[in-house]
Image: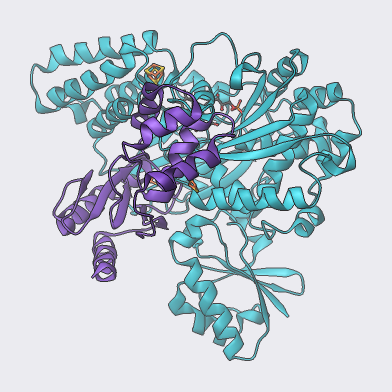
Amino acid sequence: MITVYVPGDSAARSVGADTVAAHLVAGAAARGHDVRLVRNGSRGMLWLEPFVEVDVNGTRFGYGPVSSDDVDSLLDAGILEGAHHPLAHGNVDQIEWLARQQRVTFARVGVIDPLSLADYEAHGGLAGLRHALTMADDDVVAEVLASGLRGRGGAGFPAGIKWRTVLEAQSDQKYVCCNADEGDSGTFADRMLMEGDPFTLLEGMTIAGLAVGATQGYVYLRSEYPDAITRLNEAIDIARANGWLGNDVLGSGRVFDIEVREGAGSYVCGEETAMLESLEGRRGMVRPKPPVPALQGLFGKPTVINNVLTLASVPMVLADGAAAYQALGTGRSRGTQVFQLAGNIARGGIVETAFGVSLSELVNDFGAGTRSGRSVRAVQVGGPLGAYLRADSLDVAMDYEALADVGAMLGHGGIVVFDDTVDMAQQARFAMEFCAVESCGKCTPCRIGSRRGVEVIDRVIAGVDREANLMLLDDLCTLMTDGSLCAMGGLTPLPVRSALRQWPEDFGGNP
Amino acid sequence: MSAFAPWSIEQAEVVVNKCASRTGPVLLTLQALQCEFGYVHPDAVPLVARTLNVSRAEVHGVLTYYHDLRTSPAPAHAVRICVAEACQSVGSGAVVQRAEGELGVSMGERSVDAIDLESVYCLGDCALGPAALVDGQLLGRLSPPQIAAVIASLRSESA
Ligand SMILES: Cc1cc2nc3c(=O)[nH]c(=O)nc-3n(C[C@H](O)[C@H](O)[C@H](O)COP(=O)(O)O)c2cc1C
Ligand code: SF4
Ligand code: FES
Ligand code: FES
């Protein structure tokens, strides 16, 4: 019996993985081969999807991008014995693009069968939770604090400090809420983790819940990710059936359960207090802080809110110890970061590596420049609220502090590349338009300011009263930055101003 | 795609009652109604308010806040094209234009043969754009001719 892997990841499926899988199974059978098909997660080399792997005596050989038309020629070439073929990439573990990375949070994604508990445990799964169950709650929180793990949702707040606040709060009920709203364009790591290794997230949430004294966890998962919703629900059922979620977590007598709640198509519901409102079933309006959710969160109870990747990094911290995690990274940015190479890029996908890699290394080395083959003109880092950087200023280290120094932010680690056909005035306009569409409406600078922003940029582009309108735009940006309740209105000026400053020629000015 | 039940207040009551015991139930109840009927009929508002013991204004507020929730019947097919940055960088604009041409409508409208053309901000397929969600199925690396072919196959399905 030969094991063949064809990703069930939705990105792979979006380019035909299902048909490839069906043809492979049928083609192998027709040739008298007995194959076992595993729909694994994606390895994150998305330009090679659908990426087929064949296990030959424990070594996995990769082929891609495979279309269903290639299947016969692959089988005839003998890929079930790991044979060569024009689409062959050899031993997957030795593919340089992967071998150069440090996969920690993504260690199992693409490797295992996402819903096989046996695979999960064989690859180190549950070691973190088992270890945590032998420790005092206080020590678990101390371990996370010592690891230096910072939030991956955008703000980079130390996870351990948040957990400590919830642990120390007195309450009859506490919650853990996982933020799986992943609304930023150019980001897909949360999705790939939930589809490719959902147990890791459940384990991380359980560790968090038990450590802070919460019995219920919620995953707020965007409706745009139907596959992730299905997969995570399946994983929860399996975890419950196997006794590591529910009334007696791994026989410890302790209680923790998890429920998935589906979003309803609102970007601002990724902001943590809007997410809480939405989880409570209301309009996703941002709440003023304080009170912080750690003290008064879901239904007014102390609540840990963390991003998918933050929580999915926790099992490793508990399994291998804070020191091992701490040893990776640079300065105050410890551990690894999961970068997502997106947009007009030749080799897009997941690059997980220690903090401090340069943006240029990511875009030019890992990414190999644009997909169109034209030159890079602009790179947006950190989602729709992130700054645009010029192709000649990519020499910046990718950590929270170094990026802040150049007026940019890491956000959720999304990197979107544009070639030289991009019109930066249109990108600035889009940033304002997006804010206008997605604003929760609570504060005027964001709700109204963004609409005015679109109009003003349109006048600048049309050359109407250019100087006066540019001044107005600048005032508007200052007002939004200073007067908005949350980062939606507060950071929209970032992409707008970065475009204006670095590409004045696109706004009818002199370069 | 029209696997939806026709609107019926009796059936709606069953759906709403099932959700009533859940925590923070208003949004998920509306989502469940939409799951059942393809949309949230305006007559459901007083029903939801009464059953969940909240004001009609509260229910209406939630119903109108979220992009996903609709108050008129679902289309025969939905073509949701990603218009966010990463897809823009690889030509989602041309895909949108072609889809508009094929369907004879602008983004946000319904064609005469009941195909909705909608924009969506990011589908998590940002390395393989342009992306679209067609009747719930994610498609990547789209080109204008491909979106035209997708629309043609939706039409032959309906015909
Ligand atoms: C407009 C807006 C959208 C956001 N979207 C997300 C999101 O989709 N996912 C996420 O994890 N955090 C998002 N955040 C950040 C959250 O508010 C919050 O900081 C985060 O979930 C905390 O988790 P972490 O500490 O693990 O990063 C968003 C913030 C803002 C202002
Ligand atoms: S800045 Fe915008 S999104 Fe944030 S609270 Fe104000 S109106 Fe809502
Ligand atoms: S709301 Fe019932 S499954 Fe979507
Ligand atoms: S930007 Fe289009 S799928 Fe993410």
Q: Is residue A304 visible?
A: yes
Q: Is residue A2 above or below residue A471?
A: below
Could you say which is closer to the camera, residue B33 or residue A455?
A: B33
Q: Is residue A393 visible?
A: no
Q: Which chain is cyan?
A: A
Quadrant for the N terminus of chain A in the image: bottom right
Residue drawn at (52%, 39%), measured in percent from left and top? B17
Write down the quadrant of residue A212 in the picture: top right
Residue drawn at (56%, 42%), measured in percent from left and top? A190
Q: Is residue A203 above or below residue A148?
A: below
Q: Is residue A305 left or right of residue A459?
A: right
Which percent across, then down, holds residue B154?
28, 65
Could you say which is closer to the camera, residue A418 or residue B65?
A: B65
Which percent across, then down, holds residue A285?
43, 21
Farthest residue in the left direction?
A464
| Chain B tint in image | purple
Which percent across, then down, holds residue A196?
62, 53
Q: Is residue A508 left or right of residue A8?
A: left
Q: Is residue A185 left or right of residue B102?
A: right
Could you say which is closer to the camera, residue A57 or residue A328?
A: A57
Write down the quadrant of residue A310 in the picture: top right
- Badge count: 0
